[in-house]
Image (cartoon, rainbow, N blue to C red):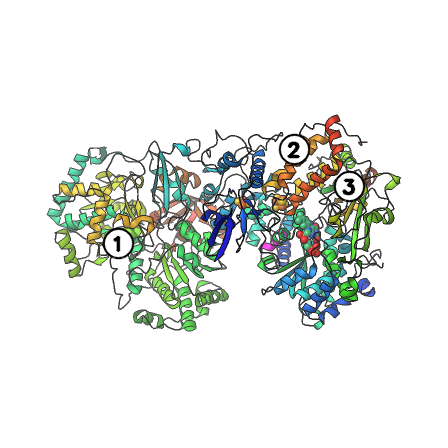
């Protein structure tokens, strides 16, 4: 399949507008500007495009809600916080193919009658900031952005807003708080961003990869797009594979590509022919899978049926050299560090779980620790304000679900069998 | 107080948003560049120029992990140790920095040349282990490559 | 109509409310911590999670709105487990120091754990350790106990509007700090203390000396400080005031207090209180007995009255004393001594301004409800900072801004800085030009309503162009136009008038302009009032030309009525006003003056002149609770019971009459009792059983208070006009005087500010307030500091022909140009010592604002 999202990213000056135009960029925007906003949304509906940020929410549905709200101005926010550990799928678009995103946002802006857009870029991507700002500048010069885009009397302004190191700002309401100059703590829903979002105005938040799909949707039409990959969850998808495979990296494949194929076909299998031990298929927050459970189509609808989630499509592959207690501990250290502190179970629970895992990892576990882990994470699960806390709890529960013996080994012997 | 250029820069930033408050995060970046770190004076300056209560400016500034709420070294080594980097040996690199440069996580070398910050995922998992030195990415790190890289930062 | 079922019970609701409110309305208890009825929803603690049918996840009752047909369960096994789990999370880092914690017994966490909590702790690691912060003089911060419900922060930011504290860091490291990290350096309202559910932020005043279960008595009473009249609960143990707290649902302040109200009570128990009567014997004040003192006063006053006539005696009433005290006092002056020479420091602006405004709009024009302010769509503030003078009223202004109203401020209004989109600061003594400009513009925009001939007479001749204003006041034209725009388009405007305006050159003319403005936009006027019973003493007749209920002494038919009730002929001529008395004293025409609860020397400008005048009076009686600068000059000093020790009533600036209640006991007599004793000794019967008895007579005598009884005052229900009839009629023509202020150019001039933390004589004896704000400073602008080459802490000598002061400098961005900002709150350091004033001929207030001063490095 020809690449859409990662098209010619290997070209050294792929980020330059000239290069982008040469390879057929900014063709869909003029087309979109001649269309009625509702018709664009209709096209997206036909395409069956789902959000790539993790939740897999149908894009057209979210857009319809926002369009239905009578308040103006409306805002379009691009979620470029890419914080889910293991995820590096948006970065190549941001750094190598920024105009694809800009074109996608200009199209979406018109579809939503949104006049202002912001790209919420994580602080950890300083290079991307300069690249994006340069690209936005070029787009303004060429009239793809501004008060009167391509003389069609349509306005869309775009700016980059840099985060400062907070995973929670990837959550859309926390992102909005952060954009407004506040702490990145999630808001009470309802009201939902589509009605009361940034600056109290109707707001759509979409992921980088999601928005980058729009030029293609308009290019080939929703009908044709919906034929790519999984029927009820179509389109090209960027899978980013890290860990113990021969060829880690980003892979643009049809949505629903089998996890085993991704690992063994596309990434050349486990490095040095070692044994696979565990796979985290969609970023740290998604349930870990043991080797015998990786025959599953990687999309939003099928992964849950196979005991995990697609999440951000960040595949972390671990071979036999890895101590899973340690991985679990490290994951909880992450959640503890990123807990925003708003709600009790996450603020206190993540730290507590990390402490328990820490002592087990250090061979200082106490009897009852397994039950304690399950009970404490159980007291978090479903009780936190936002999904971050749930994610933390489910990591512990799933690691124990599939790898309990290894934890108990640590407890019993006070040592790690795989260390070294 | 901000320098003339900084004030100009901040006017430009404010113009990007419908409210002055929304310029708080970028303004804090400017302040830490201007003042070296986020001292009380830095926060006062931010608060004054945006008309935001100073306690709020500080509250927001201390929420985010990448703001310098402590004086730091000239160069900030931001090494990722999250899972993908960890399973490819990031921890050995932490030890290496400790032994070779006396650089502890969260610490600064006596000569103020380096500070070390342990990062959560920095989006370079496919080329792990990875780090940022100030604004520059470095990937597929080894003990040797690190030595070479840090050599470039005085 | 919405119907929801909670635990199988059907509940009908008029309008959608949260599940929590619905449950509470039906008496169903759901535990909460981060929820607080005064604060914005948060949903963070997760303690109120409940099961809702058709919803996969548990929901927080404090945030979820009810919808028709919703079915909720709050008491399942699962929910019980959830609550136990949440409380366990809160406890893992919460110290178990309840036996030592001041909060024990009223700690929400402690109560919840008792009811729902886990029994044993499964947490094996070290709890978080944070040392208690004692850097602040009045507030103690203990972050080990903090549960990060953020109620204090939401109170400080969303209600008080001070934004002095915030959550620092995030996740498990989250904790609450003021900006400095130590001292709060805030408005010290202490409202964060009220809402903290645990012992994390507490008052230092009763540290380790307060235990809720040891409180012997709780008394609901009215704050002694300003004219807002907040209701407060005084908690007492061993006959000592241990703590003052607000209560939700009370009129005016509904659960809030300011620094003075909450922390200013220590004057009651002050060691400086007078213990017994003092009599001057060969030059020195010596202890004596009540008998001797009262006898002496009675004889001397009779003697003087009989020899020189009542006109040779004058009385000063007190805005700190109750209506009962003041009523008896004016009766004593009029009936026992036969003179109308009675006045008070209300003369320094409030009294004249109010009658001026009432002459135009009718009585009660300033009697507007304070909570109503927040519903205005525009508020004009001129002549003072409401957040400092009347803090709780100030909060209503901030709340108005938060609700989308526009705040317009003229001059130096620090407390509203973040709230007003346009602050205009006219150069010294040009407020009149600014107001003229606004009035002319409004006249052209809106036209004349045609309902007030006399006022329109005046308005017609006003024609000042925006350009004139820009030239004279140094105000940007667009600011002026924005002002006019906002006022013209406002449907429910309010106008707040502060002392600085009433005490400026040409005050009456400026008032006229404000009345004109108010007339053109059909607004409501609020007169800021610094003293708790300033309004009350006017209404009960402590005025030279008005009898109780504000009836002019000049009108015979009125006078006759009082004479028949009091069984005594009354003087027909209005008596001397405050300033008339001072002149008479200086001229030697005043033989005696009786000063009740007023520090005249200190609180009247040109202190040395006042002092000199008093020295010329043969027989000075001062009745007070402290040996004030004034009392030191007396021939007889009579100690009175204070606010905390007596019953009575105050009338606040809304003209709401509220009851003061005795909270502690003390040997002594109420002001009214002392006076009636003296009257008895002068053979004029005055016997009242108690304050209520006095009130009963007053409500017979005063047409304004007619038929009012104590029970009518319950719950703040006694709002103007009461049962009686107000005074009808407005003036046919309006007198004003334009006055002549100093010329601005290049000179240093003086402004007097009323700081939030002090009132003067009382607050100086309140330890906590002194700890917050220890002494007088001269606040000056950076420019002024530059041109004088002084920095913070350097000493400045500020002088006028009236006197000179040496004060430490405090450089303050918010002060402008050549303005020297002084206060009149500290002994020997009062700005009033510097001022030789001219009176406005109409409202008779002294012009203090913008007086020229000489300044040099001291
Ligand atoms: C804790 C948390 C972190 C998240 N991080 C990200 C992120 O880094 N990038 C992203 O696009 N979406 C992230 N999301 C999902 C967003 O909340 C939101 O669903 C998404 O941006 C919507 O865009 P989409 O519909 O295009 O996927 C996160 C959600 C949660 C709860
Ligand atoms: S679960 Fe709670 S504490 Fe954790 S990030 Fe979400 S809101 Fe914050
Ligand atoms: S009371 Fe509802 S979440 Fe705290």
* Mark 3 nearby-residue class (10 Å; few <14, some 14–19, many ≥20): many
Of residues C359 and A360, the one drawn nearer to the viewer in this rendering: A360
Is residue A65 or residue C604 the one in the foreground?
A: A65
Q: Is the magenta stretch mostly helix, strand or loop?
A: helix
- Disc 1 on helix, strand or loop? helix
Q: Is disc 2 in contact with disc 3, using a CB cutoff of under 8 Å?
A: no
| Direction from residue C234 to residue A227 in the image, left or right | right
What is the x, y in percent for residue A374? 67, 36
Residue B144 in the image: state x and y as whole percent: 83, 38
C-alpha gap between disc 1 and disc 3: 80 Å
Horizontal placement of A289 versus C4: left or right? right
Q: In this view, does C318 lie above or below A348?
A: below
Q: Which of marks 2 and 3 is in front?
A: 2
Residue B24 within the magenta-colored segment of the rendering: yes
Q: Which mark is residue C539?
A: 1
* Magenta span: B20-25
Which structural element holds mark 3?
helix
Residue A162 visible, this orientation: no
Q: Mark 1 — on which chain does it sit?
A: C
For disc 2, the marked residue is A372
Q: Quadrant where the N terminus of chain A lies?
A: bottom right
Q: Are marks 2 and 3 on the same chain?
A: no
Residue ID for mark 3? B85
Say above or below: C476 vs C647. below
- Is there one chain holding both mark 1 and mark 3? no
């Amino acid at each position: 399949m020809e690449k859409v999202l990662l098209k010619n990213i290997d070209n050294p000056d792929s980020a330059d507008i000239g290069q982008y135009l040469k390879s057929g960029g900014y063709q869909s925007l003029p087309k979109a500007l001649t269309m009625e906003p509702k018709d664009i949304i209709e096209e997206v509906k036909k395409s069956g495009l789902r959000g790539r940020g993790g939740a897999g929410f149908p894009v057209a549905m979210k857009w319809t809600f926002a369009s239905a709200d009578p308040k103006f101005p409306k805002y379009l926010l691009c979620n470029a916080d890419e914080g889910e550990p293991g995820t590096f799928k948006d970065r190549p678009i941001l750094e190598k193919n920024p105009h694809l995103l800009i074109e996608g946002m200009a199209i979406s802006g018109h579809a939503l009658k949104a006049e202002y857009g912001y790209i919420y870029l994580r602080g950890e991507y300083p290079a991307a900031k300069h690249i994006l700002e340069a690209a936005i500048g070029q787009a303004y010069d060429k009239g793809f952005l501004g008060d009167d885009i391509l003389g069609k009397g349509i306005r869309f302004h775009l700016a980059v807003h840099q985060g400062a190191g907070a995973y929670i700002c990837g959550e859309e309401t926390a992102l909005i708080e952060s954009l407004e100059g506040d702490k990145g703590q999630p808001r009470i829903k309802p009201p939902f961003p589509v009605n009361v979002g940034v600056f109290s105005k109707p707001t759509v938040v979409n992921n980088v990869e999601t928005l980058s799909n729009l030029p293609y949707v308009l290019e080939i039409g929703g009908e044709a797009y919906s034929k790519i990959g999984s029927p009820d969850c179509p389109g090209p998808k960027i899978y980013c594979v890290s860990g113990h495979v021969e060829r880690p990296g980003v892979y643009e494949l049809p949505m629903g590509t089998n996890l085993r194929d991704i690992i063994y076909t596309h990434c050349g299998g486990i490095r040095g022919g070692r044994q696979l031990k565990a796979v985290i298929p969609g970023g740290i927050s998604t349930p870990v899978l043991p080797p015998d459970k990786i025959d599953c189509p990687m999309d939003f609808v099928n992964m849950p049926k196979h005991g995990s989630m697609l999440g951000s499509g960040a595949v972390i592959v671990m071979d036999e050299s890895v101590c899973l207690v340690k991985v679990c501990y490290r994951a909880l250290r992450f959640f503890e560090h990123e807990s925003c502190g708003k709600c009790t179970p996450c603020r206190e629970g993540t730290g507590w779980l990390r402490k328990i895992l820490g002592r087990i990892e250090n061979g200082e576990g106490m009897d009852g620790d397994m039950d304690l882990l399950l009970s404490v994470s159980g007291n978090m699960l479903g009780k936190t304000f936002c999904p971050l806390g749930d994610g933390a709890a489910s990591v512990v529960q799933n690691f124990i679900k599939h790898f309990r013996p290894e934890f108990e080994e640590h407890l019993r012997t006070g040592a790690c069998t795989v260390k070294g | 107080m901000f320098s003339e250029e900084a004030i100009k820069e901040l006017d430009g930033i404010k113009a990007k948003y419908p409210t002055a408050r929304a310029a708080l995060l970028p303004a804090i970046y400017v302040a830490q560049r201007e003042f070296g770190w986020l001292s009380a004076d830095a926060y006062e300056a931010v608060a004054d120029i945006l008309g935001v209560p100073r306690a709020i400016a500080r509250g927001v500034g201390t929420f985010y992990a990448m703001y310098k709420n402590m004086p730091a070294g000239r160069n900030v080594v931001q090494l990722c140790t999250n899972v993908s980097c960890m399973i490819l040996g990031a921890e050995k690199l932490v030890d290496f920095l400790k032994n070779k440069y006396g650089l502890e996580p969260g610490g600064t070398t006596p000569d103020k040349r380096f500070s070390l910050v342990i990062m959560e995922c920095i989006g370079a998992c496919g080329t792990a282990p990875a780090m940022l030195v100030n604004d520059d990415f470095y990937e597929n790190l080894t003990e040797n490559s690190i030595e070479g890289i840090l050599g470039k930062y005085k | 109509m919405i119907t929801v079922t909670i635990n199988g019970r059907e509940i009908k609701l008029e309008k959608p409310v949260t599940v929590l409110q619905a449950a509470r309305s039906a008496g169903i208890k759901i535990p909460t911590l981060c929820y607080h009825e005064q604060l914005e929803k948060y949903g963070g603690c997760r303690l109120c999670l409940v099961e809702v049918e058709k919803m996969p996840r548990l929901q927080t009752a404090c945030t979820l709105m009810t919808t028709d047909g919703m079915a909720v369960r709050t008491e399942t096994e699962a929910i019980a487990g959830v609550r136990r789990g949440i409380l366990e999370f809160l406890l893992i880092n919460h110290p178990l120091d309840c036996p030592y914690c001041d909060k024990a017994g009223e700690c929400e966490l402690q109560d919840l754990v008792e009811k729902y909590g886990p029994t044993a702790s499964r947490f094996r690691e070290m709890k978080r350790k944070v040392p208690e912060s004692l850097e602040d003089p009045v507030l103690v911060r203990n972050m080990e106990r903090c549960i990060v419900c953020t109620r204090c922060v939401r109170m400080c930011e969303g209600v008080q509007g001070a934004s002095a504290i915030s959550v620092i860091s995030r996740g498990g490291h989250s904790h609450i700090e003021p900006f400095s990290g130590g001292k709060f350096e805030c408005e010290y309202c202490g409202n964060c203390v009220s809402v903290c559910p645990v012992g994390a932020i507490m008052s230092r005043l009763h540290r380790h000396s307060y235990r809720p279960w040891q409180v012997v008595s709780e008394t609901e009473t009215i704050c002694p400080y300003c004219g807002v009249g907040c209701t407060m609960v005084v908690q007492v143990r061993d006959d000592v005031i241990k703590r003052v707290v607000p209560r939700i649902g009370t009129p005016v302040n509904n659960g809030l207090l300011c620094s003075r109200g909450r922390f200013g009570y220590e004057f009651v128990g002050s060691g400086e209180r007078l213990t017994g009567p003092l009599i001057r014997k060969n030059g020195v004040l010596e202890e004596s007995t009540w008998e001797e003192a009262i006898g002496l006063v009675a004889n001397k006053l009779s003697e003087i009255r009989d020899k020189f006539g009542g006109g040779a005696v004058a009385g000063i009433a007190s805005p700190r004393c109750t209506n009962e005290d003041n009523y008896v006092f004016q009766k004593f002056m009029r009936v026992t001594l036969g003179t109308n020479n009675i006045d008070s420091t209300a003369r320094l602006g409030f009294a004249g301004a109010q009658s001026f405004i009432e002459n135009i709009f009718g009585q009660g024009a300033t009697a507007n409800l304070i909570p109503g302010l927040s519903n205005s769509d525009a508020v004009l503030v001129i002549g003072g900072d409401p957040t400092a003078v009347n803090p709780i009223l100030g909060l209503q202004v901030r709340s108005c801004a938060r609700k989308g109203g526009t705040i317009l401020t003229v001059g130096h209004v620090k407390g509203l800085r973040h709230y007003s989109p346009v602050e205009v600061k006219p150069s010294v003594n040009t407020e009149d030009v600014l107001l003229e400009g606004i009035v002319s513009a409004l006249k052209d925009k809106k036209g004349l309503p045609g309902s007030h001939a006399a006022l329109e007479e005046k308005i017609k001749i006003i024609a000042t162009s925006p350009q004139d204003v820009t030239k004279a006041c140094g105000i940007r034209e667009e600011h002026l136009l924005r002002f006019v725009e906002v006022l013209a388009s406002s449907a429910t405007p309010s106008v707040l008038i502060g002392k600085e305006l009433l005490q400026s050159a040409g005050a009456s003319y400026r008032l006229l302009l404000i009345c004109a403005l108010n007339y053109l936009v059909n607004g409501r006027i609020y007169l800021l009032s610094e003293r708790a019973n300033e309004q009350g003493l006017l209404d009960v007749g402590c005025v030279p030309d008005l009898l109780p209920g504000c009836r002019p002494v000049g009108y015979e038919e009125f006078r006759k009525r009082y004479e028949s009730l009091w069984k005594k002929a009354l003087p027909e001529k209005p008596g001397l006003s405050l300033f008339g008395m001072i002149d008479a004293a200086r001229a030697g025409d005043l033989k005696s003056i009786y000063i009740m609860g007023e520090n005249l020397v200190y609180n009247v400008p040109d202190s040395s002149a006042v002092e000199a005048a008093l020295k010329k009076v043969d027989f000075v009686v001062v009745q007070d609770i402290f040996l004030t600068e004034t009392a030191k000059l007396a021939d007889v000093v009579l100690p009175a019971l204070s606010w905390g020790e007596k019953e009575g009533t105050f009338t606040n600036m809304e003209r709401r009459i509220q009851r003061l209640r005795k909270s502690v006991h003390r040997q002594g007599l109420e002001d009214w009792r002392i006076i009636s004793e003296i009257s008895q000794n002068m053979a004029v019967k005055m016997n009242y059983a108690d304050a209520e008895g006095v009130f009963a007579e007053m409500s017979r005598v005063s047409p304004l208070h007619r038929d009012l009884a104590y029970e009518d005052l319950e719950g703040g229900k006694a709002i103007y006009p009461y049962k009686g009839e107000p005074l009808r009629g407005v003036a046919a023509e309006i007198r004003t005087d334009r006055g002549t202020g100093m010329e601005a150019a290049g000179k240093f001039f003086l402004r007097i500010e009323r700081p939030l933390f002090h009132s003067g004589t009382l607050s100086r004896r309140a330890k906590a307030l002194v700890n917050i704000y220890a002494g007088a400073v001269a606040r000056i602008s950076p420019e002024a500091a530059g041109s004088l080459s002084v920095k913070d802490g350097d000493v400045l000598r500020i002088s006028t022909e009236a006197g000179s002061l040496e004060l430490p400098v405090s450089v303050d961005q918010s002060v402008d140009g050549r303005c020297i900002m002084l206060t009149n709150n500290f002994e020997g350091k009062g700005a009033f010592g510097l001022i030789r004033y001219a009176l406005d001929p109409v409202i008779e207030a002294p012009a203090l604002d913008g007086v020229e001063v000489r300044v040099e490095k001291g």
